Image (cartoon, rainbow, N blue to C red):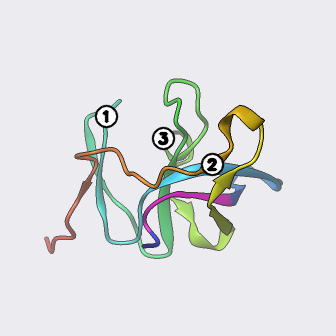
Amino acid sequence: DASSGSWVWWTPVDHQRKAIKRVIGLPGDWISVPETKEIRKIPEGHCWVEGDNGSVSRDSRTYGPVPLGLVQGRVTHVVWPPRKIGRVDKRVPEGRVMPQRNL
């Protein structure tokens, strides 16, 4: 399922810097942005990404939807630090993504 888990992508403001963020929505999805209570539709060719620490994370809440062309790969495991070794949790925060709808 492409919409779950974390992806590696080039940041929109510095194409030489990579970031790892959780994918919240894909093209055509409607997502709720808790900080603004806004409902946004993800445009074609884009995704919505967020870090796990929303109050300080630079992500789609800062940049808006991110072009899929910046995505480089999917994160499956944590390998460092050793105390966190394991599979990456693929959950999307509950209630954030609404079914696609035609308006």
Q: Residues within 10 Å of mark 1 (few under 14, many from 20)?
A: few
Q: CA distance from mark 1 to mark 3?
A: 10 Å
| Residue that numbered label 1 is attached to | 34
The vertical placement of 62 against 99, above or below, is: above
Which of discs 3 and 2 lies nearer the camera? The answer is 2
Coordinates of residue 75 in the picture (x, y in percent): 64, 59
Say which quadrant the C terminus sits in.
bottom left
Q: Please tell me which of labels 1 and 2 falls first in the chain.
A: 1
- Residue toward you, 33 or 20: 20
Whichever of labels 3 and 2 marks the residue nearer the N terminus, that label is 3
Front disc: 1 or 2: 2
Judged left or right of residue 95, residue 13 is right
Relative side of 41 to 69, left or right: left
Magenta residues, start to end = 3-8
- Disc assigned to residue 61: 3
Please give the name of the residue rendered at 37% of the width and 51% of the height, measured from the top-left corner: 92
Binning the other alpha carbons within 10 Å of mark 2 as few (below 14), some (14 to 19) or many (20 upward) gives few
- The circle drawn on residue 86 is 2
At horizontal 55% and vertical 40% (from top left) the residue drawn is 51
